[in-house]
């Protein structure tokens, strides 16, 4: 999908259809499909949000309507994808010695957006990362 050439309304429709298409699949299939769905989003490498202040984070609709695409906002969209289809998910702030950023984590085992377009097993990347903060639906309930 060409994210740059798609209207905000079309992005929202595509995201809704995508969520419907993965709702009844396994967690690993959901993770793989979600990684690939957001892989083509044109991201900025400079963070567009303050990842220390969840109350300031944009809603998924604000992200889809705007153009503030960065690794963190993609992770927020991924988080909401899982939250909206009922798959348990956390949003984890990590430090990989080069940078700090948010990644969605499923079942405390699967991490998305550590590598764009791929899923990672937490035990494979733990030596490379340090977990700074973990956000759950309770801490993110203001962002809907």
Image: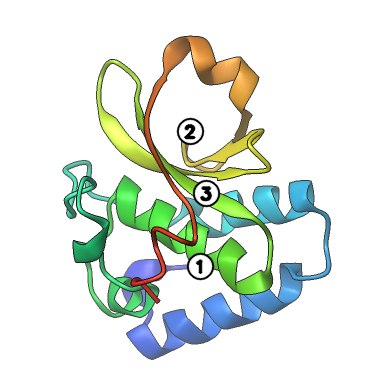
Q: Residue at x 36, y 42 (%)?
A: 102
From the viewer's perspective, tell me whether residue 83 is left or right of residue 56: right
Q: Which mark is residue 90?
A: 3
From mark 3 to mark 2, how far is it between C-alphas?
A: 17 Å
From the viewer's perspective, tell me whether residue 128 is left or right of residue 30: left
- Up/down of 116 relative to 120, above or below: below
Q: Residue at x 38, y 79 (%)?
A: 6
From mark 2 to mark 1, how far is it between C-alphas?
A: 19 Å
Is residue 127 among what the camera can see?
yes
Picture coordinates of residue 133 (x, y %)?
36, 36
Q: Which mark is residue 18?
A: none
- Up/down of 44 relative to 111, above or below: below
Residue extending farthest to the top is: 127
Q: Secondary structure at mark 2?
A: loop
Residue highlighted by disc 1: 1
* Picture quarter with the C terminus: bottom left
Residue highlighted by disc 2: 115
Nearer to us: label 1 or label 3? 3
Q: Nearer the viewer, residue 104 or 137?
A: 137
Q: Residue at x 30, y 71 (%)?
A: 63
Q: Secondary structure at mark 1?
A: loop
Residue extending farthest to the bottom is: 9
From mark 1 to mark 3, how far is it between C-alphas?
A: 27 Å
Mark 3 neighbour density, 10 Å: few (under 14) some (14–19) many (20 or more): many
From the viewer's perspective, tell me whether residue 139 is left or right of residue 17: left
Q: Secondary structure at mark 3?
A: strand
Q: Nearer the viewer, residue 131 or 30?
A: 131
Is residue 42 among what the camera can see?
no
Nearer to us: label 3 or label 2? 3
Q: Earlier in the sequence, mark 3 or mark 2?
A: 3
């Amino acid at each position: 999908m060409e994210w740059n050439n798609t209207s905000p309304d079309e992005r929202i429709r595509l995201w809704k259809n995508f969520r419907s298409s993965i709702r009844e699949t396994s967690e690993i299939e959901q993770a793989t499909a979600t990684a690939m769905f957001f892989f083509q989003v044109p991201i900025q490498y400079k963070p567009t949000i303050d990842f220390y202040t969840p109350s300031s984070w944009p809603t998924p609709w604000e992200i889809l309507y705007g153009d503030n695409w960065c690794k963190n906002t993609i992770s927020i969209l991924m988080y909401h994808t899982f939250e909206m289809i009922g798959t348990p998910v956390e949003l984890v702030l990590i430090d990989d010695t080069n940078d700090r950023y948010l990644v969605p984590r499923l079942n405390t085992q699967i991490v998305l957006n550590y590598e764009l377009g791929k899923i990672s097993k937490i035990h494979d990347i733990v030596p490379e990362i340090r977990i700074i903060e973990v956000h759950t639906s309770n801490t993110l309930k203001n962002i809907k």
